[in-house]
Image: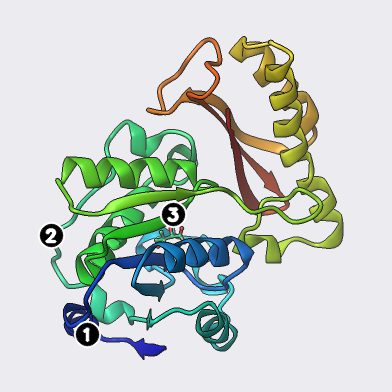
Amino acid sequence: MKIISNALELKQELREQNGTIGYVPTMGALHEGHIALIKEARKENKVVVVSIFVNPTQFLAGEDLNRYPRRDEADKKICELAGVDFLFMPHAEELYFDDEVKIAAPNVRGYVLEGATRPGHFSGVLRVVMKLLNIVNPTNAYFGKKDAQQLNLIELMVKQFFMDVNIVPIDTVRDSDGLALSSRNAYLSKEQRQDALKIPKSLYRASQMVSRGILDVESIKENIVDVLEPLEIAYVEILNREFEVIESVEIGKSVILVEALVGNTRLLDNVWL
Ligand code: PAF
């Protein structure tokens, strides 16, 4: 595995490769969820590239940029063992420029749900993902379904900017207690982790309602809110795959999204119905 921090050097290396390139962008602190993305990339491509970059532009002032978990040495080992060919670890000064040309999140879809509580977050995500995709120029890029809104906006960017990459969504990986894996779970105390389990439980209950034939969005949302009590809820939303509001769940075409605060930690989860 080659570890590279310079964007132009990585571009040159990748130009010399033959065959498909699978790419997994990450912010490090790798867990089984990331490993699932890397394994899929390994299965489907000749060359696998992973990047680790804690992107400052997607954190708002006062958020956890400075305490975001950083485990570079462990991450390097994980990548090596997972069969990664190139690990890209750029520095912010090399990726960003003064007086920069900027891509921004769309005014509507980028400012609802997580975008409503974190205005500007998705502009930062799209800015860095656009740069990273242009550097790596992958055939396939892998993103987790846990960050459903991020995935939706990246798919939108790729479509609207006529970008030549196939975005591959990968199912959420859960711990044995049901909590969706996230680097931010590291912030939770033992008690908070117990509280956090209300999130997957609420989604499980919602899926059960749907399998019993209850498709009315308002009834399902009420049930989710009941299960989540007394957590502070950022949003509970049921949308179609285009992220538009619906009144009734359509199986195979809907997604339930939840964000709740456990202590100071924002946790996201969702279920694709
Ligand atoms: O999902 C993440 O880890 C980040 O938002 C991403 C896509 C690597 C961009 O910084």
Mark 3, residue position: 143
Left or right, 114 with respect to 22, comes to: right
Q: Earlier in the sequence, mark 1 or mark 2?
A: 1
Q: Which mark is residue 13?
A: 1
Q: Nearer the viewer, mark 2 or mark 3?
A: 3
- Which amino acid is tagged 3? Phe
Q: Would you name the residue on which mark 2 appears? A: 101
Mark-to-mark CA distance, 2 and 3: 25 Å
Q: Can the viewer see residue 26 in this picture?
A: no
Q: Position of residue 4 (x, y in %)?
A: 33, 88
Residue type at tag 1: Glu
Q: Could you tell me residue 144's position as x and y percent?
A: 50, 52
What is the secondary structure assignment of the residue under circle 1?
A: helix
Ligand 1 position by quadrant: bottom left
Q: Which part of the image, by quadrant, shows the N terminus?
A: bottom left
At 63% from the left and 48% from the top, the residue drawn is 267
